[in-house]
Amino acid sequence: MNLEILGNKEQTAPLLGYINVHRRGRIRLSRALVLGLSLKTGQRVILANDRDSKKDWYITFSGDEGEGYKLNSLSKQVSTILVAEYNTDVVRTLLTAIKADISATLLIAMNHPIQNNGKNWYRILTSNPKRVK
């Protein structure tokens, strides 16, 4: 008999948020992602593609200065949903990689970031987009 014990404290389900990307360059962050990572208006979002594995995409967030694209509130009443106007070429490359023409909703694994250059990079789960147009 080979039993796998479930519910072990070391086994945690991934905390998931999502982003919605549109070919015009707009990236919309879900409330779960904003609250889970304590993101604020004015911070910056950065997308990256792994050079060694072109199917792997990552996202990170930085302070209000430097590289990346600024996060803004979707509306004055809803400060927990943030958007960024990103570089359209980068967004279109991501959409092409997942075979989407116009837009896609992609999950982000929030509780297992990868450290690189002093930043937490969160994996964008491109293998199974939730909505593709």
Image (cartoon, rainbow, N blue to C red):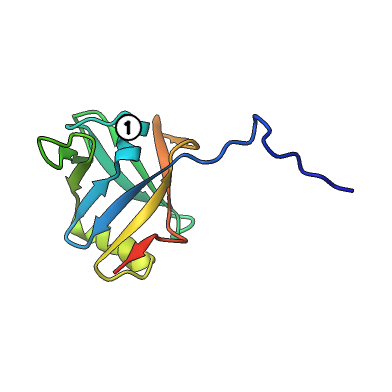
Q: Nearer the viewer, residue 121 or 126?
A: 126
In the depicted structure, whether residue 41 falls above or below residue 122: above
**Residue at 23%, 30% in the rendered image:** 40
Q: Position of residue 38 (x, y in %)?
A: 31, 28
Disc 1 secondary structure class: helix
State left or right for residue 67 relative to residue 120: left
Please state the horizontal and vertical placement of residue 106, each as a whole percent of the image. 37, 54
Which quarter of the picture shows residue 46?
A: top left
Q: In the visual, does 89 lie left or right of 60?
A: left
Q: Nearer the viewer, residue 96 or 32?
A: 32
Q: Position of residue 20 (x, y in %)?
A: 28, 54
Q: Position of residue 104 (x, y in %)?
A: 31, 61
The residue sitting at 11% across, 40% down in the picture is: 75
Per the image, the residue denoted by label 1 is: 35
Q: Is residue 54 left or right of residue 79?
A: right
Image quarter for residue 42? top left
- Mark 1 is surrounded, within 10 Å at the Cα level, by few (under 14), some (14 to 19) or many (20 or more) other residues, namely few
Q: Which residue corresponds to the image point at 75% horizontal and 39% vertical from the top-left?
A: 5
Q: Residue furthest right?
A: 1
Which of these two is toward me, 21 or 115? Answer: 21
Identify the amino acid type marked 1.
Leu
At horizontal 27% and vertical 71% (from top left) the residue drawn is: 101
